[in-house]
Image (spheres, rainbow, N blue to C red):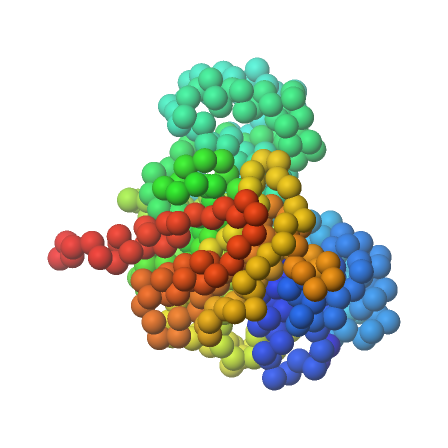
């Protein structure tokens, strides 16, 4: 089959890389792609939000399956437009994508369907005084979230009431996140360990991807500003088989059933961002697509015919025979430009990409080609991913960091503690 991947980051590179390995795939396109993706797919010069152009291209080229990477086109309704044109596309409809597109909708949905989530209150632009009163009566720390899409940066953890009020003011009055912040959600801060659980679903049935743990903060030991993600690993040992079963029973199954009951069946990849607390798992957020950088560690651990799996989910008849998991672990370390997630410069030459050891893939996130050189072209530049077949997590982490040592560009920054939390858990004395 001919496959089109929509997007240009590390997640899309991981999808292209894995789809190229599917026996049912004859050709892969990516729109718009990047310098790394260009080595494995034919690039199309269309922006991910150019839905008219993408529909026209997929129709003209008779694309058998389109896979959407980023959230923006999904929230804009790309799936509905493709379906109206008779094209098969993997992802949720615009109505189903509201689970990510509106945090207020997602919280109200979870409340309606008794899905565990932190206590919260929603406030709109004309309710700032009510938000202040609510915050003044709440116990910090508090979490303030922009309702709409904010590139993974619209969530602020506020240690004091003053910080929370300032965050709400910045969104509702100061236009801190534009239209995304015209409604805010203020919720309780949960203590525990975060984990990402992703599934591929046809709206009724689902297969799980290995639980992953992202590292959002810019600096080691979870310090610094929130980013789009500085690294990830899978499987995350915080989720054992018993907890995974509980997550499916208490969160995933009610979510799919609730979406069907409300007339918006969810097909595609559903990402559940969870906090594992002493009282059980609770949903911090939904995403309506593969996570980034989680995709760089969960997709490489999938075996079978990945394209056939996604196609069957998109068609509403999940083919579980196309699904299998590899034994082992995967670790992704994000190499970022100096200054990220604030202002950063680009155009820096990257060296070392031609000498990576077996088992390591450099997923390109923000790169471009200039002559024979690969240059930086974004805040997050590369996702250095080690896939350790049959290897323990500690060995895979070591392989990943060894590979990082082979790469260089001016101002390169990265975290040096990816996976450390997992190693502490794995090596903790047994309480039994």
Residue most extreme to the bottom: 23
Give me the residue at 62% from left, 76% from top. Answer: 20
**Camera-side residue: 283 or 415?**
415
Rendered position, 118 above or below 273: above
Can residue 224 be seen by looking at this rendering? yes
Q: Is residue 303 left or right of residue 328?
A: right
Q: Is residue 397 left or right of residue 170?
A: left
Rendered position, 406 above or below 326: above
Residue 261 coordinates in the image, percent (x, y): 58, 55
Give me the residue at 74% from left, 70% from top. Answer: 42
Rendered position, 247 above or below 301: above
The quadrant the N terminus occupies is bottom right
* Image quadrant in which you'd find residue 204: bottom right
Give me the residue at 81% from left, 75% from top. Answer: 62
The quadrant the C terminus occupies is bottom left
Give me the residue at 69% from left, 57% from top. Answer: 368
Residue 157 coordinates in the image, percent (x, y): 46, 32
Residue most extreme to the left: 432
**Camera-side residue: 4 or 365?**
365
Residue 290 coordinates in the image, percent (x, y): 56, 58
Can residue 266 be seen by looking at this rendering? no
* Image quadrant in which you'd find residue 389: bottom left
Please tell me how many numbered marks the rendered image carries: 0
Residue 374 coordinates in the image, percent (x, y): 65, 59
Q: Is residue 6 left or right of residue 54?
A: left
Q: Is residue 409 left or right of residue 117?
A: right
**Camera-side residue: 238 or 116?**
238
**Camera-side residue: 321 or 165?**
165
């Amino acid at each position: 089959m001919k496959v089109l991947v929509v997007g240009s980051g590390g997640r899309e590179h991981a999808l292209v890389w894995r789809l190229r390995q599917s026996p049912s795939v004859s050709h892969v396109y990516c729109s718009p792609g990047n310098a790394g993706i260009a080595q494995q797919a034919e690039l199309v010069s269309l922006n991910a939000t150019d839905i008219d152009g993408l529909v026209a291209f997929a129709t003209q080229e008779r694309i058998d399956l389109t896979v959407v990477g980023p959230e923006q086109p999904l929230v804009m309704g790309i799936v509905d437009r493709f379906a109206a044109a008779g094209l098969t596309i993997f992802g949720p409809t615009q109505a189903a994508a509201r689970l990510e597109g509106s945090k207020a909708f997602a919280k109200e949905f979870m409340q309606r369907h008794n899905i565990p989530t932190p206590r919260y209150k929603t406030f709109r632009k004309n309710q700032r005084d009510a938000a202040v009163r609510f915050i003044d009566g709440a116990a910090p720390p508090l979490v303030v979230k922009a309702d709409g899409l904010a590139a993974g940066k619209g969530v602020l953890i506020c240690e004091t009431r003053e910080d929370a009020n300032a965050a709400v003011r910045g969104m509702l009055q100061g236009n801190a996140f534009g239209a995304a912040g015209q409604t805010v959600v203020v919720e309780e801060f949960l203590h525990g360990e975060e984990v990402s659980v992703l599934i591929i679903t046809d709206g009724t049935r689902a297969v799980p991807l290995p639980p992953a743990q992202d590292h959002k903060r810019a600096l080691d030991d979870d310090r610094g500003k929130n980013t789009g993600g500085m690294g990830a690993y899978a499987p995350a040992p915080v989720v054992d088989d018993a907890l995974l079963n509980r997550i499916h029973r208490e969160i995933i199954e009610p979510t799919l059933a609730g979406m069907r009951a409300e007339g918006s069946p969810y097909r595609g990849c559903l990402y559940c961002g969870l906090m594992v607390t002493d009282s059980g798992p609770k949903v911090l957020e939904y995403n309506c697509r593969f996570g980034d950088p989680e995709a760089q560690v969960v997709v490489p651990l999938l075996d079978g015919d990945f394209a056939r799996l996604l196609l069957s989910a998109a068609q509403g008849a999940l083919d579980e025979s196309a699904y299998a998991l590899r034994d082992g672990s995967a670790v992704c370390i994000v190499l970022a430009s100096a200054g990220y997630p604030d202002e950063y410069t680009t155009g820096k030459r990257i060296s070392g990409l031609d000498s990576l050891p077996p088992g390591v893939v450099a997923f390109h996130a923000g790169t471009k080609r200039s002559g024979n050189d690969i240059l930086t072209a974004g805040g997050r530049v590369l996702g250095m991913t080690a896939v350790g077949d049959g290897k323990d997590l500690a060995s895979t982490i070591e392989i990943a960091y060894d590979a990082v040592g082979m790469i260089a560009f001016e101002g390169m920054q990265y975290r040096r503690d990816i996976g450390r939390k997992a190693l502490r858990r794995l090596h903790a004395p047994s309480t039994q």
